[in-house]
Image (cartoon, rainbow, N blue to C red):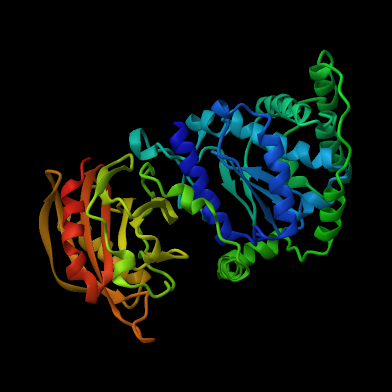
Amino acid sequence: MSRQQQEQVGLQAAEQVYTQMPVLPDTSPETKYVQALGERLVATIPAETSWPFQFHVVAQKEINAFALPGGPMFVNIGTITAAKTEAELAGVMGHEMSHVYMQHSAKQQQKSSLLEGIAGLAGAAAGQMGGNWGSMAATGINFGAGTLLLKYSRGDEAQADAVGAIILWKAGFNPVALADFFETLEAEGSSGPQFLSDHPNPGNRRAAIEKEIREWPDQQYAGDSPEFATVREHAAGVHAYSAQEIADGAKSGQWASENRKNGAVFPGAASAAKPQAALTTAARSAPTAPTSSSVPAASLSQVQPSASFATADLGLLQIDRPENWDVRGGQNSSVTIAPTAGVSAGAVAYGVVIRAVQMSEADPEVTRATAAIVKSLSSDDPNMKQVGEIKKLAVSGQSAASAQLETNSPIAAGGNTQPERDWLVVVPRGQGHAIFMVFVSPLADFDRLRPTFEKMLRSVKF
């Protein structure tokens, strides 16, 4: 996995955490503190070898922390309250950062499975697809009851301990605190079984770390800051949920709704919005519709495409986009190209949704493949209907087909529901794979945006 692929996988998974788990907003005392502590640790890593680390807090009782490929990290409330010292909390975070730094997930790519929808609690789909189709496999990632877990080997753990010790020492913390926290977990037993099972003890952690730092220069290690005591006390009063409660809430959509209401919005969407998103197969036969909730009203001037275009490299294809339309990694391994005012909370009112899928039929004829995708999109959105017949066309010299669809736009007009036009284009790619693009706009604006959509489609190169 390239650096770009790791960052994209991490951003996609992190975005989904915000729909699967109760995340505290960045304005919360716990998040502000963890971010400040994280920045202190990141500062010890040379910029040229570092990663775009992020730090977030999950309102979960159980002790856990995980860092995704590319750098997004999530720390449970239970971890903050369980840490006896600031150095112990820093040790957990430094240890997780080390897994990212050492690229342990990427190095396990040959052992990995391709996730069936990167955010599902259902787990991973068996088998790995080769070539570009498997290039964004989220290696080593598994989903459990309300937690996102990365499985590490004992060798990974030993390396993360060694690198974590360096990070702690350079940040002024006693590296042995890392071992202290793991020993606390082991002593409490039932308090952190999942965290321990996914972070197997590589041996005598304390002895190994003490040996690691034996020849290092002496220094006066930092004690607890006043902020640590304050935020630990405050964290004890935060309403936190059990893993089972979180799993139940994820199934009902509770967290996606509550996080938006509480102002907990994944800040990585802006980071993902660069013309180097990676597109991979969703490994599923039922693609979902591009709209699912509401988008604040926007004027045509806010979504009007720029006359200047830039090329977006999505891995499996390249496509030219208006310079003022961003590229975002979306759910189920999709990519959205849209103006900022045209998307919100997973809904797309203006723009293009591109997704690679595996068809249930080995190699369906192009119109049959298109009809299957229309059927799948319509089953996901009962308001969606096909307008007219499926028509054949060519995309980048490849046989393709298109269909005109209509549904309800997530942007209301004058307080009333308005129709949306979705122009679906499907390009089979062999071996049961297909790429489909949905060009989206309220029906009233579609003809004005059609030239932009057609220009984008003409620019596609595989």
Residue 283 or residue 228, whichever sits in front? 228
Query: Which residue is located at x 67 percent, y 33 percent?
Result: 43
Q: Quadrant of the C terminus?
A: top left
Left or right: 209, with 295 as reference point = right
The image quarter containing residue 350 is bottom left
Residue displayed at 83% across by 60% down: 234
- Asked whether residue 122 appears in the rendered view, the answer is no
Front residue of this view, candidates 53 and 2: 53
Relative side of 400 to 253, left or right: left
Which part of the image, by quadrant, shows the N terminus?
A: top left
Query: How far across and down, in percent of the image, does residue 247 sit?
Result: 63, 62
| Residue 338 position by quadrant | bottom left
Residue 432 percent location from the top left of the image: 27, 46
Residue 408 image position (x, y, % from top left): 32, 77
Q: Position of residue 112 (x, y in %)?
A: 50, 36
168 vs 387, nearest the viewer = 168
Q: Is residue 213 above or below residue 430?
A: above
Q: Residue furthest top?
A: 215
For residue 211, say whether it is visible: yes
The residue at 57%/55% (across/down) is 17
Determine whether 262 is above or below 143 in the image. below
Residue occupying image coordinates x 42% and y 71%: 295
Numbered circles on residues, count: 0
Q: Is residue 93 above or below residue 235?
A: above
